[in-house]
C-alpha cells in the first residue's frame, strides 16, 4: 500500500498537462552589443527595458568564433551551432568559379518572388548546412507549426525561417517586403494587404527627429567621420528623401537607416500574427523578428552617436508594441515565450577611437590585397589574384589553377607576409589551420568559424581596434574581440525564471534553451545546451 501511495504522490506532483507555449517570439537586434545595451539601459523604460527587468537576462554572452557578422550570427542563433557546422562563415563569400564575391545565401534557382533579383544576392537557405530551431519545430509537429521570420535583411530572415518556415525581408529597390520562390509561390493575402499600405513611401515625407530633448543625449551630434549618406545630413533632424523628388531606392535606403524601419517591422509582424493565425491553437508557432535598423545606424554613425542613442530609445518603444501584439495573439503572457539576442556588436569609428588615444586604425582591405599581390608576384614570378573579405584571404589566378606554382607554398608565403603587417596578430594558411599553435585562444575562434568550402585560403587575425573597411567613414565589425562578439541574451515568459545571470554564456545556447521550452529535441547540429538555471521546469 505504501508503495502505491508513493507512486500516486509522484503522479500528483507532475504537471497536469505538459504543454509548450502557443507562441515563441524570437527577437534579434542587429549590432546590439552588450556594451551598447548596458550603456543605454537606464533610459529604456518601454518593451526592451521591461524585458531586461522581467526576464532571465544574460548581459555577457559571447560568440566563440572569430568573424562576428550578421549572416553567421543569425545562423548560430537559429541552429545552436558554430559556422564550422552550419557553413555560414560571413555575409559574403568568394565564388572561385566566377572570381566574384557573392552573398552567402545566394541561390540562382530561387529568385525573388514577383520582383527583380540582383545577381549573387541572398534568396534561400540552400547553403545553410545545419537544421534550425524552426525546422526542428516543424518536424516535431509534423508540419503543423507555423513559422514566420521578418527582417530588413534577407541574411537575417532566411536562417531564422530555416528551410521550412516563411522568410520575408525589405527590398530597398521597391520599398516592399519580399520573399523568394523557395518560400512561396504566391504572395499571401495578408502580405499583399501590408505592402499595399506603402509604409516606406509614407516615410518619404517624414524626418527623423530626436525622440527626447537634446540635453538628454551624450556627446556631440556632429562627430568626426560620420557620413554624408543618402541625403540625410550629419546632424538632426535627418531628411529621409534620399535626395529624390519622389519615393525610390535612395529614399528607401534612408528609411532603412532610420528608426522608422522598426515601426515597419512591427506592423509587418502584427500582420503576420493575424494573417497566419500564429498562437491561436495548441500547436506552438514561432514569430522571428530581426531589427536591422540598429546595424544601419551603427555602420553610418557609430555606436556612441546621437543617432544610435535615439534608435535605441525608439527600439524600446517598438519592442513594447511587438511584445503586446504577440501577447494578444497568444491569448496572454502565460502562452508566450520570448527570446532576445543579437548577431554581433561593433567597433567605434576608428578615427574617434584614435582621437581618444586608443591605438585604432582603419584597415583598407583593397590596399592590403594589392600589397599582398605585389609580394606574391615578386616571390613567385606569376600573377596571383588576391581578395580580402574581412579576415579571409582568397587566392586565385591562372598560375594557381594550372599548377604552375605550388599552391601550398603560395598560401604559406601569403600568410608569412600578412603576419608581418602592422595591423595583424598572425596569419595562417588553411593547410596549417589545424596544427598551428593557439595564440591567446584566437586560433580556436578562427577554427570554429572556418568552413572549407567557403572560407579563405589564408586567414589572419587583426589587432584590436583595427576596423576593416574600404569606406573612409563610419565603422564596421567582424573580429573576435569583445566589442564585436559580446551580446546580450534574454529569455522571458512561460517556464522562465527571471533574474540577472552574470555568467558568460555562448549564443549557441539560445536554440537549445528554446527547444527545452518548446518541449522538443534540439536542432540536429546544435553545440549549445539549455540554460537550466533560467528554467523553472514548470509546464
Image (cartoon, grey):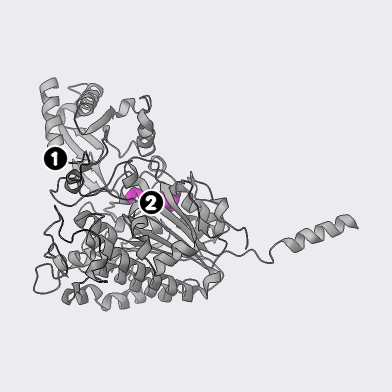
Q: Is residue 114 visible?
A: no
Quarter of the image for the N terminus: give it. bottom right
Q: As displayed, is residue 496 above or below residue 531? A: below
Residue span colored magenta: 71-80
Q: What residue is drawn where x is 50% and y is 71%?
A: 279
Residue to which mark 1 is pinned: 366
For the residue labelled by badge 1, is the local secondary structure a helix, a strand or a loop?
Answer: helix
Residue to which mark 2 is pinned: 487
Residue 78 image point, x, y percent:
42, 53
Label 2 or label 1, whichever comes before in sequence order:
1
For the residue labelled by badge 2, is the local secondary structure a helix, a strand or a loop?
Answer: strand
Let me know if residue 153 is in the magenta part.
Answer: no
Question: Circle 1: is it few (<14), some (14-19), or many (20+) Cα within 10 Å?
Answer: some
Q: What residue is drawn where x is 52% and y is 53%?
A: 513
Q: Nearer the viewer, residue 299 or 409?
A: 299
Q: Nearer the viewer, residue 258 or 11?
A: 258
Let me know if residue 73 is in the magenta part.
Answer: yes
Q: As displayed, is residue 408 above or below residue 254? A: above
Q: As displayed, is residue 249 above or below residue 394? A: below
Q: Which mark is residue 194?
A: none
Amino acid at each position: 500500500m505504501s508503495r502505491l501511495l508513493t507512486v500516486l504522490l509522484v503522479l500528483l506532483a507532475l504537471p497536469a498537462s505538459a504543454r509548450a507555449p502557443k507562441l515563441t517570439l524570437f527577437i534579434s537586434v542587429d549590432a546590439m552589443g552588450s556594451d551598447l545595451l548596458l550603456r543605454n539601459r537606464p533610459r529604456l523604460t518601454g518593451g526592451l527595458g521591461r524585458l531586461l527587468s522581467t526576464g532571465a537576462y544574460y548581459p555577457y554572452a559571447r560568440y566563440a568564433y572569430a568573424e562576428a557578422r550578421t549572416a553567421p550570427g543569425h545562423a548560430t542563433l537559429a541552429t545552436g551551432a558554430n559556422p564550422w557546422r552550419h557553413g555560414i562563415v560571413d555575409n559574403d563569400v568568394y565564388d572561385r568559379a566566377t572570381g566574384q564575391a557573392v552573398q552567402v545565401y545566394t541561390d540562382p534557382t530561387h529568385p525573388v518572388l514577383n520582383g527583380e533579383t540582383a545577381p549573387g544576392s541572398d534568396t534561400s537557405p540552400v547553403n545553410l548546412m545545419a537544421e534550425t530551431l524552426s525546422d526542428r519545430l516543424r518536424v516535431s509537429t509534423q508540419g503543423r507549426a507555423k513559422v514566420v521570420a521578418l527582417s530588413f535583411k534577407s541574411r537575417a530572415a532566411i536562417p531564422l525561417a530555416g528551410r521550412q518556415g516563411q522568410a520575408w525581408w525589405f527590398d530597398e529597390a521597391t520599398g516592399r517586403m519580399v520573399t523568394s520562390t523557395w518560400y512561396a509561390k504566391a504572395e499571401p493575402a495578408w502580405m499583399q494587404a501590408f505592402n499595399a499600405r506603402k509604409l516606406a513611401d509614407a516615410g518619404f515625407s517624414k524626418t527623423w527627429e530626436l525622440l527626447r530633448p537634446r540635453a538628454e543625449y551624450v556627446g556631440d551630434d556632429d562627430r568626426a567621420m560620420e557620413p554624408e549618406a543618402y541625403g540625410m545630413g550629419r546632424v538632426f533632424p535627418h531628411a529621409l528623401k534620399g535626395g529624390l523628388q519622389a519615393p525610390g531606392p535612395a529614399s528607401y535606403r534612408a528609411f532603412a537607416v532610420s528608426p522608422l524601419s522598426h515601426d515597419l517591422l512591427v506592423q509587418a509582424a502584427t500582420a503576420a500574427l493575424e494573417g497566419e493565425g500564429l498562437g491561436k491553437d495548441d500547436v506552438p508557432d514561432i514569430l522571428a523578428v530581426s531589427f536591422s535598423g540598429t546595424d544601419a545606424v551603427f555602420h553610418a554613425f557609430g555606436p556612441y552617436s546621437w543617432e544610435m542613442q535615439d534608435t535605441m530609445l525608439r527600439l524600446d518603444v517598438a519592442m513594447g508594441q511587438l511584445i503586446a501584439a504577440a501577447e494578444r495573439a497568444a491569448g496572454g503572457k502565460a502562452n508566450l515565450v520570448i527570446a532576445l539576442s543579437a548577431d554581433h556588436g561593433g567597433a567605434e569609428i576608428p578615427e574617434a577611437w584614435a582621437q581618444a588615444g586608443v591605438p585604432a586604425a582603419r584597415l583598407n582591405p583593397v590596399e592590403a590585397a594589392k600589397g599582398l599581390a605585389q609580394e606574391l608576384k615578386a616571390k613567385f614570378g606569376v600573377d596571383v589574384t588576391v581578395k580580402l573579405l574581412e579576415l579571409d584571404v582568397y587566392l586565385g589566378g591562372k598560375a594557381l589553377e594550372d599548377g604552375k606554382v605550388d599552391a601550398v607554398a603560395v598560401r604559406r608565403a601569403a600568410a608569412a607576409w600578412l603576419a608581418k603587417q602592422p595591423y595583424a596578430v598572425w596569419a595562417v594558411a588553411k593547410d596549417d589551420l589545424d596544427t598551428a599553435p593557439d595564440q591567446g585562444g584566437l586560433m580556436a575562434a578562427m577554427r570554429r568559424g572556418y568552413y572549407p568550402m567557403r572560407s579563405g585560403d589564408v586567414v589572419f587575425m587583426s589587432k584590436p581596434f583595427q576596423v576593416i573597411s574600404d569606406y573612409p567613414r563610419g565603422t564596421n565589425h567582424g573580429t573576435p574581440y569583445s566589442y564585436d562578439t559580446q551580446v546580450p541574451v534574454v529569455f522571458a515568459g512561460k517556464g522562465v525564471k527571471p533574474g540577472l545571470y552574470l555568467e558568460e554564456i555562448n549564443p549557441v545556447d539560445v536554440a537549445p534553451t528554446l527547444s527545452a521550452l518548446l518541449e522538443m529535441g534540439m536542432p540536429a547540429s546544435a553545440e549549445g545546451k539549455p540554460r537550466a538555471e533560467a528554467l523553472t521546469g514548470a509546464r
